[in-house]
Image: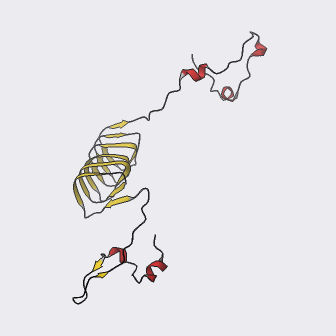
Amino acid sequence: MWKKEEVKSQGVPEIAPAISPALPPAAGGPLRDVPTFSLPLSSKAAACISQGIRIKGEVTGSEDLFVDGHVEGRVNLSNGSLTVGPNGKVRASVKAREVIVLGTLHGNVETGDRIDIRKEAKLVGDIKTARIMIEDGAYFKGNVDIIRAEVPKPSAAPAASAPRPAATGTPSSAPAAGPAMAAGAGEHKR
């Protein structure tokens, strides 16, 4: 962020980023240039659609998005999260890594990670997700399809190639119970 010393040394008031880059001429003189500041971009920037904004169409990106206005159409945030604010009204099909609903969302939702429907939220549509959380007081109408993450199955080859102690047929030569056997994990049906 900016340091106060840098802003004051340039003679620019602290609200300078909120004003336009050029001020109108003073009494017919030339335009006065105001120094512009560039904000450092993080690896995960966020965008905001405030209460007074209405968007109709398709919103795509890979950043996080906070919607407190109105969005209608399609929202596709490939690796980002969508937060529908308490005043937000989204009427769209949504595909994102994560979705948090505080306001109203009408449409099908597909997430790669999770969806949270908070207590004052309203969601009408089908959900396809790995994890879901619905707080008391939330309204949800639709179907939920839980997706399990693809977990690689252990192959039989490594287990078969593990060395086994040779049995001699006498009870005294049986292997001692290891930590897995002591914990009861060794009881498997074959």
Q: Give the camera-side residue of 25 and 42.
A: 25
In the orientation shown, which residue stands out farthest toward the front? 30
Residue drawn at (44%, 33%) of the image = 150
Tell me the quarter of the picture where residue 31 sits.
bottom left
Q: Residue at x 71, y 17 (%)?
A: 165
Q: Residue at x 23, y 59 (%)?
A: 54
Q: Position of residue 129 (x, y in %)?
A: 38, 40
Query: As drawn, is 169 to the left or to the right of 73?
Result: right
Camera-nearest residue between 4 and 122: 4
Q: State the colouring used for the structure image.
A: secondary structure
Image location of residue 41, percent across then percent down: 42, 62
Q: Is residue 117 visible?
A: no
Task: Tell me if residue 7 comes above or below residue 172 in the rendering.
Answer: below
The C terminus - image quarter:
top right
Quadrant for residue 71, please give it. bottom left
Q: Nearer the viewer, residue 86 or 59?
A: 59
Relative placement, left or right, of 94 versus 10 is: left
Q: Is residue 174 above or below residue 45?
A: above
Where residue 117 appears, x then y in whole percent? Answer: 37, 49
Outermost right residue: 172
Residue 21: x %, y % from top left: 31, 75
Regarding residue 54, the answer to whether it shows in the image is yes
Q: Which residue appears farthest toward the top when viewing the image?
A: 169
